[in-house]
Image (spheres, rainbow, N blue to C red):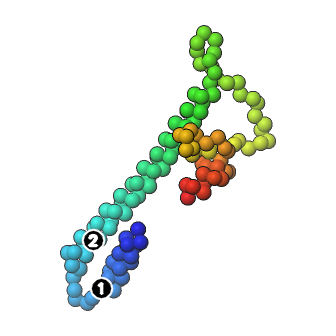
Amino acid sequence: MRAVVLLMLVLFAIRAFPRQGQAPSPELERVERALQALSDLKAKVAAIETQLDQMIAELSEQKGAAQNRKPAAFGGMGEVAASPADPSKPKSVRCGAMTAKGERCTRPSVPGSRYCRQHQMAHQ
């Protein structure tokens, strides 16, 4: 990562202070194209990671909902009766991280984050 940043700085310096009367070399153009392609790929990877985080959170919620169902009469699945929520209390969101056992963390998330305090430190 540092090498890429250093290379970008060198290329910027070369581009900002060109030698007079000298055209850019084909090698420099090739390196610039490669850097642009890598930057584009990095942006795409970040977008995919965001989508993966959303999908994992949704599937974890579905798994949690399925685990909270209890058998209803005649073999069907029924929802667990929810207690009336206190409107003055803010809604608590469950942490989106997975534990070492492969189960979803049961702690509430920190306001403004997807993770509890412990997992928030691990995901930074």
Pick out the residue farthest to the front: 101
Alpha-carbon neighbours of circle 1 within 10 Å: few (<14), some, or many (≥20)?
Answer: few
Name the quadrant of the C terminus.
bottom right
Using residue 43 as the reference point, say whether residue 61 is left or right of it.
right
Where is residue 54? Give x, y as percent.
Answer: 51, 44
Circle count: 2
Q: Amino acid at mark 2?
A: Val
Q: Which residue is mark 1?
A: 18
Residue at 57% across / 28% down in the picture? 66
Mark 2 residue element: helix
Residue at 21% over, 82% down: 23
> Do we see residue 113 in this rendering?
no
Point out the image quarter for the N terminus.
Answer: bottom left
Name the spot of residue 92 as percent of width and height, x first.
Answer: 69, 42
Q: Position of residue 113 (x, y in %)?
A: 62, 51
Q: Nearer the viewer, residue 14 or 114?
A: 114
Q: Mark 2: few, some, or many residues within 10 Å (few <14, many ≥20)?
A: some
Compared to residue 13, the image places residue 84 above or below, namely above
Q: Can you see residue 97? A: yes
Image coordinates of residue 26 in percent, x first then y, are 20, 75
Residue in the picture at 24% in, 70% down: 30
Q: Which mark is residue 3?
A: none
What's the residue type where badge 1 is placed?
Pro
Q: Is residue 29 above or below residue 111?
A: below
Q: Earlier in the sequence, mark 2 or mark 1?
A: 1
User: Which sits in the foreground, 44 or 63?
Assistant: 63
Locate residue 94 relative to residue 18 in the image: left or right: right
Q: Residue at x 73, y 44 (%)?
A: 90
**Vertical comparison of 13 with 116: above or below:** below
Give the SS element for disc 1.
Answer: loop
Residue behind mark 2: 31
